[in-house]
Image (spheres, rainbow, N blue to C red):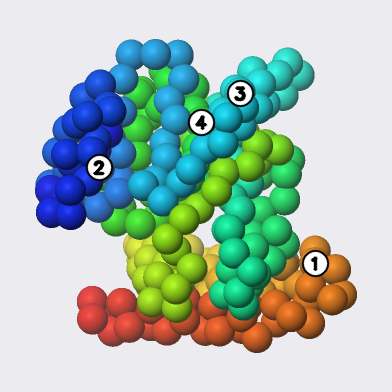
Amino acid sequence: MVDANSADGTREVAEEFADKVVTDPGKGLGMARNIGIEQTTKPLILNMGSDNVMPIGELEKMIQALQLENQGNLQGVSAQTLIEGDDYLSNGLNAWRKGRFLPGPAAVIGTPTLFIGDTLRSHPYDPARRFSDDSELCERWAKDFNATFAISDAVVHEVGKTSWSEIVVRCKMYGVSDYEVFKEGAKAGWSLKRKTKSYLHPARVDLVVPMKNLEMNEKVKALPFLIAFTALRYDSWIKTGWKNR
């Protein structure tokens, strides 16, 4: 386990159950994950967050999906995340996930992720990325050696992330990621068309795509949540850009 100098008792719990606990200096997810990856030796590497709960049998589904034949150059799979609860925010998050992260081939996969160990050790995360490490890694692998990815039919539960303050934090992280991706792309010489695609990305993936894939009754209930979610993400992007102007 990788611990970022937590002061809430997390490290003590981890040391009781984990084989090894290493310290993250708190400079971003990319570096934190690389610190853990460096300690691995096994054929597969599973990345999970502290808010993920993996029911019995679901990891086996992820392994089976990753090891299926005729999958091309499949290098990583993720799971479908389910929020427990029946309040509006829980339902909104579940609708967002259901509409956005469909099982099957995916250009980018997010936590929890299961990767081929040798590939991840030789092509780790960008340590400079604070939040956008998943998208950067998947896009880089696809470009460099035609890696492919998929969302499996495994289900993982997420706990403790259904308050409005937690949703704001999530959107803030996505907004920072948007800023980082756009900044690097602009530096690399993106065309106006590619910049426009980046500007529209949050609206497309967090509003248009979920609304397209949800059932009509789900769309009606989820629309206010999806609009607020998208707006918070853009707000974070704008504020991050302003701070770093």
Are dots 1 and 4 in contact, CB under 8 Å? no
> Up-down: is 148 above or below 200?
above
Mark 3 residue type: Glu
Viewer-proximal residue, 218 or 139?
Answer: 218
- Calculate the distance from the C-alpha at mark 4 to the C-alpha at mark 2: 16 Å
| Label 3: which secondary element | helix
Q: CA distance from mark 1 to mark 3?
A: 28 Å
Of callouts 2 and 3, which one flags the residue occurring earlier in the amino acid sequence? 2
In which quadrant of the rendered view does residue 120 lie?
top left
- The disc at residue 114 is 4
Mark 2: amino acid:
Ala
In the picture as drawn, the residue positioned furthest to the right comes out as: 216
Above-or-below relation of 59 to 221 = above
Density class for disc 2 (Cα within 10 Å; few <14, some 14-19, many ≥20) is: many
| Residue on which disc 3 sits | 60
- Pick whichever of labels 1 and 4 is earlier in the sequence: 4
Q: Secondary structure at mark 4?
A: strand
Residue mark closest to the camera, 2 vs 3: 3
Task: Kindly state the secondary structure of the residue where label 2 is placed.
Answer: helix
N-terminal-most mark, 2 or 1:
2
**189 in relation to 25, above or below:** below
* Residue depth check, mark 1 versus mark 3: number of the one nearer the observer: 3
Which of the labelled discs sits on residue 32, or is there none? 2
Residue that label 1 marks: 214
The disc, 4 or 2, on the residue closer to the chain's N-terminal end is 2
Picture coordinates of residue 76 (x, y %)?
Answer: 55, 31
Q: Residues within 10 Å of mark 1 (few under 14, many from 20)?
A: some
Dot 3, how many residues are within 10 Å of its Cα: few (below 14), some (14-19), or many (20+)?
A: few
- Which kind of residue does numbered mark 1 sit on? Leu
